[in-house]
Amino acid sequence: ETGVTQTPRHLVMGMTNKKSLKCEQHLGHNAMYWYKQSAKKPLELMFVYNFKEQTENNSVPSRFSPECPNSSHLFLHLHTLQPEDSALYLCASSQEVRDTQYFGPGTRLTVL
Amino acid sequence: AQSVAQPEDQVNVAEGNPLTVKCTYSVSGNPYLFWYVQYPNRGLQFLLKYITGDNLVKGSYGFEAEFNKSQTSFHLKKPSALVSDSALYFCAAGSAAGNKLTFGGGTRVLVKP
């Protein structure tokens, strides 16, 4: 509905698994973002990409690895996650950084 | 470091009554400010923003917010709340000199019939 799609919508993984989250925006935007939303915690910015270049890494552990092959797609590769990484992972895009961000529906991740 | 505070975890209001959701911010330099709303199992939806200009900003669904520089506040208001306004509301702030938005902790609004 907002032009930002995320797949899968739900993901359950073990601590030794490797999985990837995908985000695609159909808005022609140049900037894309990953956020983590945990229960009872503020929305946490993880990564910012502007014109496919990473411009912000908010001290995210290396078990989260982003990839931005082009301005329309953003991935978050996950490996050896911890149960405390269980959260809703939101992708967003904006025309330029500092512009209004439009969010996808999120991927609900559960790490067992 | 920039920060955003939403002092109320939850706001309860009767349908038809005015709704106010509070937000204060701390950023370096000129701020740009947003309000977003999140319904269950959905992403955040943009409501309104302030960058420059009029201190009173009008947004979607009858919401408005007032930028107050001296109080570093950006409270969200709606004159007459609807049951369908029940949701989680987030305030966000950034600095015109930076490229990062900081979100508040969110305020849950419950509008009762």
Image (spheres, coloured by chain):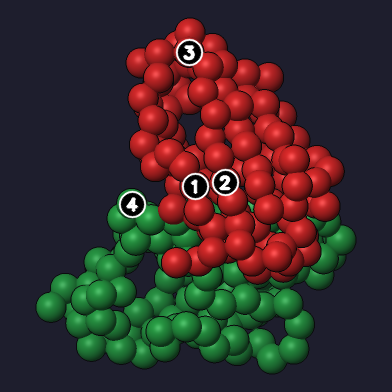
Chain colours: A red, B green
Question: Dividing the picture into quarters, in which one does residue B109 lie?
Answer: bottom left
Residue B24 point in image, percent of width and height? 59, 64
Q: Amino acid at mark 1?
A: Gln
**Which type of secondary structure does the marked residue at label 2 adopt?**
strand
**Chain on which label 4 sits:** B
**Which type of secondary structure does the marked residue at label 1 adopt?**
strand
- C-alpha separation, residue under disc 4 versus residue under disc 2: 17 Å
- C-alpha separation, residue under disc 2 versus residue under disc 1: 5 Å
Q: Are marks 4 and 3 on the same chain?
A: no
Residue A23: image tag: 2
The residue wearing badge 1 is A6
Residue A15 point in image, percent of width and height? 45, 11
Is tag 1's residue or tag 3's residue first in the polypeptide sequence? Answer: 1
Q: Amino acid at mark 2?
A: Cys
**Which type of secondary structure does the marked residue at label 3 adopt?**
loop
Is tag 3's residue or tag 2's residue first in the polypeptide sequence? Answer: 3
For residue A40, side relative to residue B50 (left or right): left
- C-alpha separation, residue under disc 1 versus residue under disc 3: 20 Å
**Chain on which label 3 sits:** A
Is tag 2's residue or tag 1's residue first in the polypeptide sequence? Answer: 1
| Quadrant into which the C terminus of chain A falls | top left
The residue wearing badge 4 is B41
**Which type of secondary structure does the marked residue at label 4 adopt?**
loop
Q: Amino acid at mark 4?
A: Asn
Residue B6 point in image, percent of width and height? 49, 59
